């Protein structure tokens, strides 16, 4: 029901399995304006021409709704989305599977 793009820690299979053990997974990429892995800063511009950095990750298809996925992610201690003091954004973005198929996915950053 939902595609979601994961990068950084959530590309690990053992963490994805904590969301649901039934999914399809694909290697993929997105274009972003800025990404700093050490500070966990990701910027995506509304102006597509400013998104010049290619970020690899995983495109995961879950047969779940997005609110249930977020609830599961919030319970994964290794990710700490809700407890790290940052405000996170959930948005739709175009991602490309490595076979060049375009896929509209959710991303949390």
Image: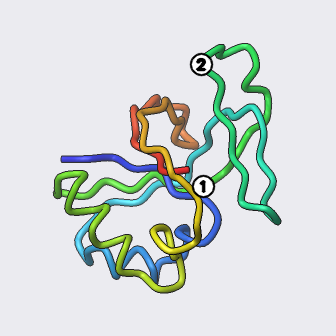
Q: Which residue is mark 2?
A: 46
Q: Is residue 65 left or right of residue 13?
A: left
**Circle 1/circle 2 CB separation < 8 Å:** no
Q: Residue furthest front?
A: 85
What is the x, y in percent for residue 75?
35, 80
What is the x, y in percent for residue 52?
79, 27
**What label sits on residue 105 in the rendered view?**
none
**Classed neighbour count for the residue bearing mark 2: other residues with Cα under 10 Å, few (<14), some (14–19), many (≥20):** few
Depth check, front residue: 75 or 12: 75
Q: Is residue 24 left or right of residue 59?
A: left
Please tell me whether mark 1 or mark 2 is closer to you in this view.
2
- x 42%, y 44%: residue: 90
Q: Which residue is mark 1?
A: 57
What is the x, y in percent for residue 108?
48, 51
**Classed neighbour count for the residue bearing mark 1: other residues with Cα under 10 Å, few (<14), some (14–19), many (≥20):** many
- x 33%, y 46%: residue: 3
What is the x, y in percent for residue 11?
55, 68
- x 51%, y 76%: residue: 80
* 77 lies above or below 49: below
């Amino acid at each position: 029901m939902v595609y979601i793009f994961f990068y950084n820690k959530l590309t690990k299979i053992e963490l994805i399995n904590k969301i649901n053990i039934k999914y399809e997974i694909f290697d993929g990429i997105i274009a972003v304006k800025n990404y700093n892995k050490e500070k966990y800063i990701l910027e995506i511009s509304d102006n597509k021409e400013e998104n010049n950095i290619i970020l690899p990750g995983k495109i995961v298809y879950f047969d779940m709704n997005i609110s249930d996925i977020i609830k599961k992610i919030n319970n994964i201690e290794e990710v700490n989305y809700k407890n790290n003091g940052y405000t996170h954004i959930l948005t739709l973005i175009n991602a490309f599977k490595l076979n060049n198929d375009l896929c509209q996915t959710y991303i949390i950053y």
